[in-house]
Image: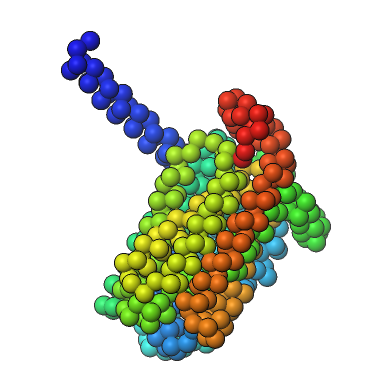
Amino acid sequence: MNKVDSSSVNSSTSQTSVKSGLSHAGRALRHRNFRLFFGGQSISLIGTWMTRLATSWLVYRLTGSAWLLGVVGFAGQIPTFLLAPFAGVWVDRLNRRHVLVVTQALAMIQSLALAALTLSHRITVTEILWLSVLQGMINAFDMPGRQAFMVEMIEDRNDLGNAIALNSSMVNMARLVGPSLAGMVIAGFGEGYCFLIDGISYIAVIISLMMMRLKVSGMERKVVPMIEQLKEGWEYVSRFAPVRTILLLFAVISLMGMPFTVLMPIFAAKILHGGPHTLGFLMGAVGIGALASAISLAFRKSVLGLGRMIAFSAAIFGGGLITFGMSRWLPLSLALMTITGFGFMQGIAASNTIIQTVVPEDKRGRVLSYYTMAFVGMAPFGSLLAGGLAHLLGAPATIIISGSFCIAGAIWFSTQLPNIRLHIRPVYRELGILPPEVISVMADGGGD
């Protein structure tokens, strides 16, 4: 074979390899129901992120108070902490698609109410607080319902991890587009139009849910006293080491790390001397890092190595926060927010994949409700803590302290990995989701 022929063959092989890799990364989209979900959510989530940024900016514009930023964050998330375990029971009892249609319709009403009050110039912090409480109540049912519904859209369990990664990509593309768009809309028209766009965007996801064709579940829905189902879910979460350890780590990260978003208006306005555009750029940078993380996860072929990834990601997240707290230069701050977003999303997607893979179907809603408590439910306490610390010590010092706790959590989680592997390997083998060569590696002492 001459050099020209050899070059052509190599080029053809390279192109085939790239196409194969891209096809593997998007394999969950071959499921019709997931394609519908992906399309509807892609539109709706842009509106959601616009509302998140617009709410923070509106509160800060009305009050100029770091403490009230924390209070509003607390009000929007504490209902999720209080209601999530009970919501998990209902998610296990009810048709999950119906649950999501109701939660999306209620969320649309909430956003439109927020838009009407803001556009009519009658909005006050009190009304923002009450509407935030309503959204938190909706999220208590929506988040575990959404996560538990994922497995119903994916017929091949081997594609579940890819679906979670693609879902994370979608969320973070919205995180990238939404805040940037919100910054422009706020600067040009005001916060009310962000809320209006969000309210209208829910129509897309409601339509996508109604268009799905789902198989009738063969699982028998239990109708037993709620307290009994709550106890059963808690016993599983507290006794199964992999799930228990993951939830404890993310409770710490949610309490100490995630409230950094509450303080972003202060960094944008006072530390970096900008405005709503600056806030949009900062949150957009988080989205870029998180999107890059989710895309990298979409190319993974197995769950092997996700345990180590969770520890590593928590350390990256914490390190990003510490250095961001020290920065006073916008380009550097944007780069550090990108790193922070990457670390956070790697940990969230990896932990979600492990939990979704190993949890029995009849307990899925309840376990994911505890996941919601750890991921979202601890954040209101963190919002109050961050607001209080920022008031006393300043926003930069608060962020540095937050990052230090996240790194401590990563170190602790690393010490728990041997015990996690001991309990999770038999589940992986029983499910038959690992290829023979991976099982061989695990048998020789390879990690998860």
Against 48, residue 3 (above or below) is above
In depth, the one of 22 and 323 nearer the eye is: 323
User: On screen, 446 above or below 68?
Assistant: above
Instruction: Tell me where residue 412 appears, x and y as whole percent.
Output: 66, 56
Q: Residue at x 66, y 43 (%)?
A: 358
Nearest the eye: 155 or 279: 279
Indicate the quadrant where residue 437 lies.
top right
Q: Is residue 428 visible?
A: yes
What residue is rendered at 42% in x and 39% in y? Answer: 26
* Quadrant location of the C terminus in the rendered image: top right
* Foreground of the two, 206 or 326: 326
Total label count? 0
The residue positioned 67% from the left and 59% from the top of the image is 248
Q: Is residue 152 left or right of residue 187?
A: right
Up/down of 242 relative to 22, above or below = below
- As rendered, which of 177 and 304 lies closer to the eye? 304
Give the percent coordinates (x, y) of residue 38.
43, 49
Indicate the position of residue 274 as horizontal and vertical percent values: 31, 78
Compared across the picture, whether 80 is left or right of 38 comes to: right
In which quadrant of the rendered view does residue 71 lie?
bottom right
Taking the view exactly as shown, the residue that stands out farthest to the top is: 1
| In the displayed structure image, the side of residue 141 where residue 291 appears, left or right | left
Is residue 41 shown to the viewer in this render?
no
Q: Residue at x 70, y 63 (%)?
A: 86
> Residue 120 falls in which quadrant of the image?
bottom left
Colour scheme of this structure image? rainbow
Residue 300 image point, x, y percent: 48, 39
Which quarter shows the N terminus?
top left
